[in-house]
Image: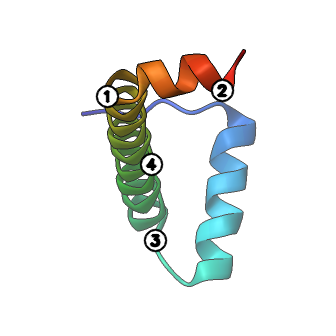
């Protein structure tokens, strides 16, 4: 895989990686892991919320009256 960054993105990544004491590659890998974990969490929360809303639909409807 080749990751193409703008000059600004590359500079920001280089600076952040240096501040964190890691390589640019490691900083990018961390960012990917964090992105995937965050989206997985959002999906799980959305699924749980939909299940709660479905199982308590009548109570939610009455609360809205």
Q: Secondary structure at mark 3?
A: loop
Q: Is residue 32 above or below residue 20?
A: above
Instruction: Report the residue at 63% width, 76% height from top.
Output: 18
The residue beneath circle 2 is 63
**Along the viewing direction, whichever of 44 and 27 lies nearer the viewer:** 44
Residue 55's label in the rendered image is 1
Q: Secondary structure at mark 1?
A: helix
**Circle 1 residues within 10 Å: few <14, some 14–19, many ≥20:** few
The residue beneath circle 4 is 38
Residue 21 x, y percent position in the rendering: 55, 84
Distance in Å between CA atoms under marks 4 and 3: 22 Å
Nearer the observer: mark 3 or 1; the answer is 1
- Mark 3 vs 1, N-terminal side: 3
- Mark 4 vs 3, N-terminal side: 3
- Hey, which quadrant is residue 28 in on the image? bottom left
Residue 48 x, y percent position in the rendering: 34, 39
């Amino acid at each position: 895989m080749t990751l193409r960054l703008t000059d600004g993105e590359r500079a920001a990544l280089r600076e952040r990686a240096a501040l964190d004491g890691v390589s640019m590659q490691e900083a990018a890998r961390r960012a990917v892991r964090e992105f995937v974990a965050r989206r997985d969490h959002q999906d799980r929360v959305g699924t749980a919320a939909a299940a709660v809303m479905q199982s308590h639909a009548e109570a939610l409807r009455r609360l809205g009256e």
